[in-house]
Image (cartoon, rainbow, N blue to C red):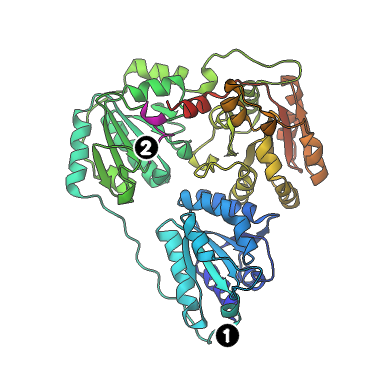
Amino acid sequence: MRVGAAAGRVLAELGVGQVFGVVGSGNFHVTNSLIDAGADYVAARHECGAATMADAYGRLSGRVGAVTVHQGCGLTNAMTGIAEAAKSRTPMIVLAAEADDPRSNFYVDQDALTRSVGAVSMRLSSAADAVATAVAAYRTAIDDRRTVVLNLPLGAQAEELADGWTLPAPPAGTVVAAPAADVERLASALAVSKRPVFVAGRGARSPEARDAVRALAERTGALLATSAAAKGLFHDDPWSVDVSGGFASPLAAELIRGADLIVGWGCALNMWTMRHGELIGSGTTVVQVDLETDALGRHRAIDLGVAGDAAATARAVATAAGTRYRTAGIGRRIAAESRWRDVPFDDASGADRIDPRTLSIALDDLLPTERTVCIDSGNFMGYPSMFLSVPDELGFCFTQAFQSIGLGLASAVGAAIEQPHRLTVAALGDGGAAMSIAELDTVARLGLDMMIVVYNDEAYGAEVHHFGPDGDDLNTVRFPETDLAAIARGFGLDGLTVRTIDDLDPVATWVAGERSRPLLIDAKIADDGGSWWLKNAFRGH
């Protein structure tokens, strides 16, 4: 067996069961080897789309997603998706063919390129180290939650591997236990707190951590919130105020700001989650629990950093403090005011434009409960993020670590592959939709159970609302009206243009029907004057 094919076989035997990619000459054999070994393969139309599909698959499955790309340009095309995955600590392996000769048109410094975006670079340099390197790449991805680019030089791929190779036994799993003294300090802080709030992030986004944090919150009377990336984690808890940060509802912001103790569980407590620090009240004690020691206090000063697994740390805290923040009055307010759709607003809909809030609330009522919502980036993103409910933390895929537009559609493909039993909803702006439009072919070709909602303001809305008040020329960020519904039909999807609430009537029919073709809704949205979350971000509060 040649080394390139062996690398695919090793990864398949280790557990890589889903692969995305764009095949060229350099990754042809490794891709076919993965398929021959039992992995499912999805051909994307662009390498960035392939990387983002694998990223979403890894986030929602907890397993390693894999991507295969051609040498040089295949990798450079994929880099934005790889950067998003790396910044999100998604377990993912990129199998990148690599040109050996610096004189080759395909040659780039793939090692430097990989490291520049925070991914781990490895190289399968010869038959002698092929198995060990492939195993190391897999273990780094799954154990350390890292995105690994495994470079496959063309010369090494052509070498022959000796017969009789075997996989080493997997190492025993370990749980990082927090120092006992830090656990006791956390317990003491909770014991004296009158108004504790727990904010869970991506590092607590597992059933085990969710249950442990939730149980501790119940014992100590803490309110529950999440970062945007962990939305849905406490979806059915009556003491959850939903998302903390720029997306926070007025009630959530009020209650988090009123806390005397905030504990971040696997949460960066960064500018977005804490709204540039505005959600931390004067005199509030801030505690951060994180698996990574270097993450503690990275984004803001904290009073206590606890290095340990979120679930194990929550279980180790032996303290109880009664109801505390969980009073009857607070409970009634959470039930009545915690959802954005319960906050009154002046409907800006007109004869040919629909208010994005009105649109989102109507869709929330029309869509089945079992759904996965995938969000692209842009001015619009707060509306589907906060007005569309999700059944659990696996119902929300938020590719925003790199804040690139154009990733939402591909992430929805990865989510749909992982969760075919749920309707996948891709929420895009018109800029991101145009940027990723080639992947409509992938959606149609796979026949995915998917609804794509384009919040179409015919602009890069964030820039319009950021620079418009200063009187700057906005011609560079405004675009002519496009018929995205017609474009979708050209790719083989159903397409619907929505300008008023009545235009949504066919959606109910589609949802209740066989859904044999994916649906794209081109929603012509009204000017919102700049979304609330973006105003907070730009103004630094």
Q: Secondary structure at mark 1?
A: loop
Q: Which residue is mark 1?
A: 160
Mark 2 Cα shell of 10 Å, populated few (<14), some (14-19), many (≥20): many
For the residue pair 79 and 483, the one nearer the viewer reads as 79
Q: Which residue is mark 2?
A: 269
The magenta-colored residue range is 268-278
Q: How many marks?
A: 2
- Magenta stretch contains residue 274: yes
Q: Residue 456, how many percent across, how many down?
A: 69, 30
Identify which amino acid the numbered label 2 is placed on: Leu
Position of 382 with respect to 506 (left or right) is: left
Position of 27 with respect to 183 (left or right) is: right
Judge whether residue 40 can be spotted in this image: no
Position of 282 with respect to 120 (left or right) is: left
- Which quadrant holds the C terminus? top left
Q: Residue 474, how many percent across, how many down?
A: 66, 28
Judge whether residue 164 can be spotted in this image: yes
Q: Residue 54, how many percent across, how many down?
A: 57, 54
Q: Residue 360, how many percent across, how many down?
A: 62, 26
**Marked residue nearer the N-terminal end (2 or 1):** 1
- Which quadrant holds the N terminus? bottom right
Mark 1 Cα shell of 10 Å, populated few (<14), some (14-19), many (≥20): some
Q: Are marks 2 and 1 in contact (CB under 8 Å)?
A: no
Q: Secondary structure at mark 2?
A: loop
Secondary structure, magenta segment, majority class? loop
The part of the image, by quadrant, that contains residue 487 is: top right
Q: Residue at x 76, y 19 (%)?
A: 352
Instruction: Determine the CA span between mark 2 and mark 1.
Output: 50 Å
Identify which amino acid the numbered label 1 is placed on: Glu
Looking at the picture, does residue 300 appear above or below residue 127?
A: above
Looking at the picture, does residue 337 appear above or below residue 400?
A: above
